[in-house]
């Protein structure tokens, strides 16, 4: 089943590091990125605005596409059909120890209720060590 995991690794006063892991039909990818509380709030609000049909799609990225931050992760999210399904296009990028750039792009799908649950749970990552991970497409 398509899924997406955000797992908090550690946190500082201004930012924290999360592991992002996603699985699609034929692939699983994982990276670690640094996020701020504002990044997470923006992701949650963008998801909620998309569900409420204030926007038709949105794009969210962490890191630099030129990999100057050593890792990169982005989400492009849009409504998939008129039946309440949404499609994530996920892009992962990283640089190995030899300075070579690697990456992959693939999509996963979800439905409105699970997407809203993810938008709510991702905000809990901002609550200083009280919530360590959140899943998309895995019921609690």
Image: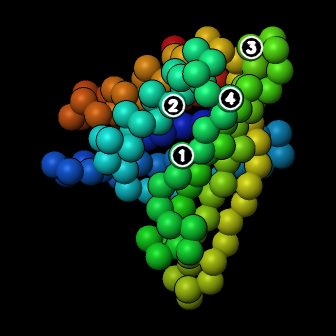
Judge left or right: residue 47 versus residue 28.
Answer: left
First in sequence, mark 4 or 3: give its number.
Answer: 4
55 or 69: which is nearer to us? Answer: 55
> Helix or strand or loop: what does disc 4 sit on?
loop
- Whether residues under marks 4 and 1 lie with C-beta atoms below 8 angstroms apart, the answer is no
> What residue did someone put label 3 on?
84
Q: Residues within 10 Å of mark 4 (few under 14, many from 20)?
A: few
> What residue did someone put label 1 on?
60
Q: Quadrant of the N terminus?
A: top right
Q: Nearer the viewer, mark 4 or mark 1?
A: 4
Residue 68: image location, x then y, percent: 47, 76
Which label number is shown at residue 44? none
Q: Nearer the viewer, mark 2 or mark 4?
A: 4
> What residue did someone put label 4 on?
56
**Can you see residue 117?**
yes
In this rendering, the answer to whether 17 lies above or below 78 is below
First in sequence, mark 1 or 2: give its number.
Answer: 2
First in sequence, mark 2 or 3: give its number.
Answer: 2
Judge left or right: residue 44 versus residue 31.
Answer: left
Q: CA distance from mark 4 to mark 1?
A: 14 Å
> What residue did someone put label 2 on?
46
Residue at the (29%, 34%) spot, across then down: 126
Residue 98: image location, x then y, percent: 56, 88
Q: CA distance from mark 4 to mark 3?
A: 13 Å
Q: Quadrant of residue 57?
A: top right
Q: CA distance from mark 1 to mark 2?
A: 9 Å
Q: CA distance from mark 2 to mark 3?
A: 16 Å
């Amino acid at each position: 089943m398509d899924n997406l995991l955000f797992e908090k690794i550690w946190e500082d006063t201004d930012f924290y590091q999360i592991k992002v892991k996603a699985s699609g039909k034929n692939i699983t990818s994982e990276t670690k990125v640094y996020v701020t509380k504002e990044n997470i709030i923006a992701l949650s609000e963008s998801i909620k605005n998309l569900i409420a049909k204030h926007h038709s799609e949105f794009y969210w990225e962490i890191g630099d596409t030129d990999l100057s931050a050593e890792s990169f992760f982005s989400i492009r999210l849009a409504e998939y059909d008129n039946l309440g399904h949404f499609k994530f296009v996920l892009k992962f990028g990283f640089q190995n120890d030899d300075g070579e750039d690697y990456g992959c792009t693939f999509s996963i799908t979800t439905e409105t209720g699970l997407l809203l649950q993810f938008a709510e749970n991702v905000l809990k990552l901002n609550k200083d060590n009280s919530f360590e991970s959140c899943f998309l497409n895995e019921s609690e």
